Each structure stands twice: as C-alpha cells, then as structure tokens.
Amino acid sequence: GGSPLGSAQALSGWTTFNGSADLDDVATLQQLPFPFPHYLKYYSQVWVSSDGLLDFDSSFVQGALTSLSSSDGQNALIAPLWDNLTCNGCRINAAWSENATGVSIMAIRFQGMSFASSASAEPLTFEAWLYEDGRVSVVVESFPSSEASRSSIKCGLEPASGKSMTVRPALSVGSSLPWGSSPFAVSFTPWFMPRKNGNATVPAGGNVTLEGAFEMAAGLQGYLHFYTSENPASWYDRTPVRISQRIFRYFWVLTGWDGGLHT
C-alpha cells in the first residue's frame, strides 16, 4: 500500500550508504529519532548492517552473527532480510514521520542490494518500518525471481536474551514468506503497544499518564514493570503489575422461550 511516510523527513546525522564503490559486511551505529521498544527494553541507537540486519546490541560485531534464536552474546535484533548481501550501486538511507494516529515511524530503506553469491541477478529492494509503539513492518518491493527458493534468508525478531524462550520468544518467519511474489509485506505487532510515556520517569510525589493500545487477541496477559531507584541509582526495586485482556460476548437465541430474560 505504499510507504506510511507521506511527509517524511531525512534523518540528520545518519550515514547514507551510497554504492559508488562495493560495500560488503559494513555496519554503522545510528541514532534513532525516538526511543524504540523492543521486547522489554527501549533503545536509542541501532547498528545498520549492509547484510539487511538491524541490531540494538551495543556489543554488535559485523559478521559475527549466524542465526536467529541463538545466545551468542549479540542479540536484540530485527532481521528485515538478513543474508550475505553486497551493495554495489545501491543506497541505504532512512527517514521518519508520523502517521494519522500520531505514532512516529522510521523507515530504513535498502535499495538495489545484491546477494553476494549471485551478484549478477536482478537487485532487491526492501524497507524496515519501526513504529514508536514497538511494531515492525518489513516491505519487500522487488526480489530476484531466480532466488525465490533461497533458504539462507532470515526474517524475524530476536530479544536481548537471544533465546527462543516461551515467555519472550524469538520469531523467525523467513522460510514461510513468498519471496518469489514481490511486492509483499509482513508485520510484527506486539500485544501491548505503548503510545505515550512508556519509558517515562515518574518524579517523586508526582504522576505520569501512560497511554497504550492492545492488539485484539483473546486470552493474553502480560506485565508492566515499574522500577523504583535511588538517585544516584545504587539500587532499584521492580514491581510487576499484571494486565489481562478478556474478550467475550453476550448473546441469546430468540425461540419460543426467552430464557426468562423478558424485556
């Protein structure tokens, strides 16, 4: 349906990869235009890799990662289209804007990329959209038809733990996507989406209004964590508050007997 960045602004201070020369296995640390919630943490910076990978881990080393759902010490990542890619004549840049509901969105665009093992194939172009409330969308605009059966592509999310846990699982969907049928998009939507003050500090004796939205899904529950700390922060206490969502409906069938409900 096209980019949500109708009046997008280029991000100042960002390094724009411009493939006037071959770029392979290159990554730069970039500042985000807003704090981005990924699983249980907020991040203000992201490593942007020419291999189609976004990593929030401060210890990230280009080329050291091999798979999703691994505890290799470099985690907290988003894989829009992660593979061994090269950038020859390509362009990687970013912009941000707000949608109609006031949620900021950043789009990172990888244009004219190539697979290192088949550089002669037609180029691929894709975008990763990061929403201020934690949603992630991957939009694949063009993909070489000759690589439709490629099994090495990774697309998904991974928490800071890196593990495929029950509570905070990594998600890997690359094997189920229609790579040969571009354009297409895939969206990752958290159950609870903080819309305002999700990462706010509450002053002593004060209050802060927390606004959020819930994905429409039955039977889910989660926790908000409130941290109390001394200043300077030599200690902290965490208080979890459980949030449950109950989706149900009232109904009855009108027959010869109305169940005693009457009017």
Image (cartoon, grey):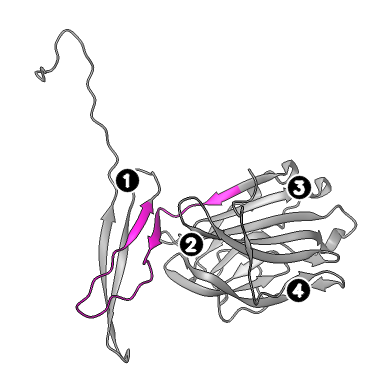
Which amino acid does the dot numbered 1 rest on? Gly
Magenta span: chief secondary structure:
loop
Sequence-first tag of 2 and 1? 2
Residue 133 position, x and y percent, is 45, 59
In the current view of this chain or complex, which residue is farthest to the right? 120
**10 Å crowding of disc 1: few (<14), some (14-19), many (20+):** few
Which amino acid does the dot numbered 4 rest on? Asp
User: How far apart are the two marked residues, 4 and 1, measured between alpha carbons?
Assistant: 43 Å
User: How far apart are the two marked residues, 1 and 3, measured between alpha carbons?
Assistant: 37 Å
**10 Å crowding of disc 2: few (<14), some (14-19), many (20+):** many
- 139 left or right, relative to 207: right
Which residue: 46% across, 56% down?
102
**10 Å crowding of disc 4: few (<14), some (14-19), many (20+):** some
Sequence-first tag of 4 and 3? 4
Residue 17 position, x and y percent, is 76, 71
Per the image, the residue denoted by label 4 is 25
Kindly identify which numbered label has been placed on residue 77.
none
Sequence-first tag of 1 and 3? 3
Per the image, the residue denoted by label 1 is 219
Instruction: Using the rendered image of the protein, determine whether residue 75 is visible from the camera's viewpoint.
Output: no
Magenta span includes 75: no
- 38 left or right, relative to 142: left
Q: Is 171 located above or below residue 199 in the figure?
A: above
Which amino acid does the dot numbered 2 rest on? Glu
Per the image, the residue denoted by label 3 is 149
User: How far apart are the two marked residues, 4 and 3, measured between alpha carbons?
Assistant: 23 Å
Kindly identify which numbered label has been placed on residue 132.
2
